[in-house]
Image: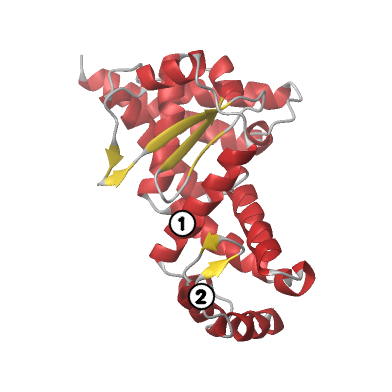
Amino acid sequence: MKRFFVILATTLSLCSCSVLGGINWNAEGLVSAAGKAATAASISDDMVVELSRQTIAQMDAQSVIDHGAYEQRLSRVLSGLKDLDGLPLNFKVYKTKEINAFACGDGSIRVYSGLMDVMDDDELTAIIGHELGHVRHKDTKRAIKNAYVASAARDILASAGSYGAMASALLGDMGEALVSAQFSQAQEYKADEHGCQFAIDRGKNPYSMYNALEKLMQLSDGGNGSVIAHMFADHPKTEKRMERMKKMADNYTASKN
């Protein structure tokens, strides 16, 4: 890993512009991260936002984005939602049978049509609230930082042979990190709570998060090969999450009676 950062820092320092393969990077920030060699903590939040923005742009270009019924439904479900703590949000639907959704540190939320096919509006609201929770709690920023370091450790610069190839490889790794991000149990608990409260605040069924988790666990039982179903294959952990969401919904319901 150290050898990679030495090569990266040296090469970038010889570059007189801040463009790698046509992608606007903060070269100074990359050199700084390389010079500090290897810790996610050395990558600034501004750099993470830029990595996120470029990654989403590449993923959007490689995906089929729906502009029909799915987009209209998502717009209806999220009507009036423009920002999160001042961070502008943007939403798109990827038309695919995959069952997934993810959030990015730049405020981009991507929902797969496969997920929308199996969730009702209330459950979809809770799932999106869950993803927004990861943004609010900065979980996605940490995931991107860690993915960047892991990608760099694979000697991308040495193997790619060009700035453009390196940039493309890095963004590919960032995209994979977003699609299949693995969060800690504590992070998932907090995101679940955020999803439940988000659904409640938008007038949805207080059991929406619980119901969504139950559906995802059932999908994993059915051998569904999607990324998100794989994440719910550990039933004891999923059942614990469901138990917490049912208790949260029960408490909210009791408080209204």
Q: Which mark is residue 59?
A: none
Is residue 216 in view?
Answer: yes
Residue at the spot 64% in from the left edge and 39% down from the top edge: 62
Instruction: State the residue in front, 75 or 167.
Output: 167
Amino acid at pointer 2 = Cys
Q: Position of residue 110 (x, y in %)?
A: 50, 35
Comparing labels 2 and 1, the label whose residue is closer to the camera: 2
Q: Earlier in the sequence, mark 2 or mark 1?
A: 2
Label 2 SS: loop
On the rendered structure, is 102 left or right of 221?
A: left
Instruction: State the residue in front, 97 or 252.
Output: 97
Q: Which residue is mark 2?
A: 17
Q: CA distance from mark 2 to mark 1?
A: 26 Å
Q: Which mark is residue 141?
A: 1
Is residue 193 in view?
Answer: no
On the rendered structure, is 182 left or right of 128?
A: right
| Residue 242 sits above or below residue 117 on the image | below
Q: Position of residue 138 (x, y in %)?
A: 40, 54
On the rendered structure, is 206 left or right of 183?
A: left
Residue at the spot 20% in from the left edge and 17% down from the top edge: 256
Q: Kindly check if marks 2 and 1 are in contact, taking CB atoms under 8 A apart as contact.
A: no
Residue at the spot 52% in from the left edge and 74% down from the top edge: 30
Label 1 SS: helix
Q: Position of residue 90 (x, y in %)?
A: 39, 37
User: Mark 2 Cα within 10 Å, few/some/many (few <14, many 20+)?
Assistant: few
| Residue 132 sits above or below residue 177 on the image | above
Amino acid at pointer 1 = Lys
